[in-house]
Image (tube, helix red, strand yellow):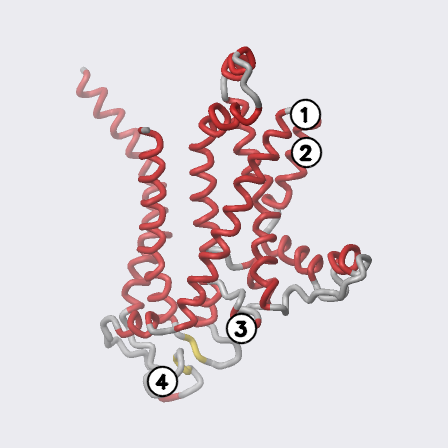
Amino acid sequence: MTSKRWAKESISLGLLIFPFLGIWLFFWLVPLVLGIELSFQPSQIQNSGDWGVNFEDESRKTVSLEYVGFENYRRILLDSKFWKAIQNSSVYVGGSILIILPLSFLLSLCLMKIHKIFRAFLVFCLIIPSLALPGVLSTLFYLFFHGRTGALNHYLVIPLGMEPINWMMDPNFIMPSMILQSVWRWTGMVTLFFLCGLEAIPKWQSEAADLEGAGNWMKIKKIWIPGIRHLAWFAGIFLVVDGFASFSGAYVLLGGSGGLLDSGLLLVTYIYQVAFPGGSGRFDFPGAAAMSLLVIPFLACLLFSALRARNYNSQR
């Protein structure tokens, strides 16, 4: 009787999981395998000295099924713009995390002191940028930072008697502006995560700390930070993945380019530039596929290191 019940439950579980497994295989595993195969195909650029396949050339309309081994990977690893994009993406992700996590923690502590009705209203206002479409959010942010007519220059910089700053054209301000956009978008959502974590901490811990004469700094160090550290790791990993996959924000702010001196060139933006060079009639899908696959081990090692560090801190 027990074995029959176990078999029946296994069949039911299989029928429940199979549709989701099929969707996962179709929309993730199949494109991954096709991308790996594509990365070993020739990009047909050896004679042109540039990325891409020229479909305007009648002689190149027939796609060759030959494979070139790791030639596309070698070409990418020798590409200075690829490493520039990696560097910019790392700065973008690191700067966003270093600002968002502490700021969200401070905001969540402040919201804990507010009445629940006003707290709910403020939290909703904070998470609106996280719920908005990235393209719409980037357009609003672009209007805020746009040259002389932008709201920031019009209401802050010029009234202070300073010259207007062209934020999106100055290499010194492009990356800070992009980081600020990420902070504006995700601070509210991370604040909500931290607020839920703080509310889940038993109140008797704070009451016991008050009886012992502990101040706010001691509570932060011994109660509140340990209580949300797992949420902080989750938020950090989420921001890393989102930062390296960021595309629409940088595309809208910089018009699909990397800005002056490629100071705002992010990884996904460069992959897009390689795959679809605008107006050139050239498409280098093998090169773009190889570039995408090169990033997977890097992100996997980064996330694995973060998880190992989290487990190590949990065992201490």
Q: Judge depth for marks 1 and 4 and give the one in front.
A: 1
* 255 in relation to 195, above or below: below
Name the residue tied to disc 1. Answer: 114
State if disc 1 and disc 2 touch (CB < 8 Å).
yes
**Quarter holding residue 47:** bottom left
Which sits earlier in the primary sequence, circle 1 or circle 4?
4
Looking at the rendered structure, the number of numbered marks drawn on it comes to 4
Which sits earlier in the primary sequence, circle 2 or circle 4?
4
Q: Residues within 10 Å of mark 4 (few under 14, many from 20)?
A: few
Q: Position of residue 292 (x, y in %)?
A: 37, 62
Q: Secondary structure at mark 1?
A: loop
State if disc 4 and disc 2 touch (CB < 8 Å).
no
Name the residue tied to disc 3. Answer: 261
Q: Residues within 10 Å of mark 2 (few under 14, many from 20)?
A: some
Q: Secondary structure at mark 2?
A: helix
Name the residue tied to disc 4. Answer: 60
Q: Position of residue 237 (x, y in %)?
A: 43, 44
Which sits earlier in the primary sequence, circle 2 or circle 3?
2
* 308 in relation to 58, above or below: above
Label 3, label 1: how many angstroms apart (C-alpha)? 46 Å
Q: Judge depth for marks 2 and 4 and give the one in front.
A: 2
Label 4, label 3: how many angstroms apart (C-alpha)? 33 Å
Q: Position of residue 18 (x, y in %)?
A: 31, 39
Label 1, label 4: how many angstroms apart (C-alpha)? 67 Å
**Which of the labelled discs sits on residue 122, or is there none?**
2
Which sits earlier in the primary sequence, circle 2 or circle 1?
1
Disc 4 residue type?
Arg
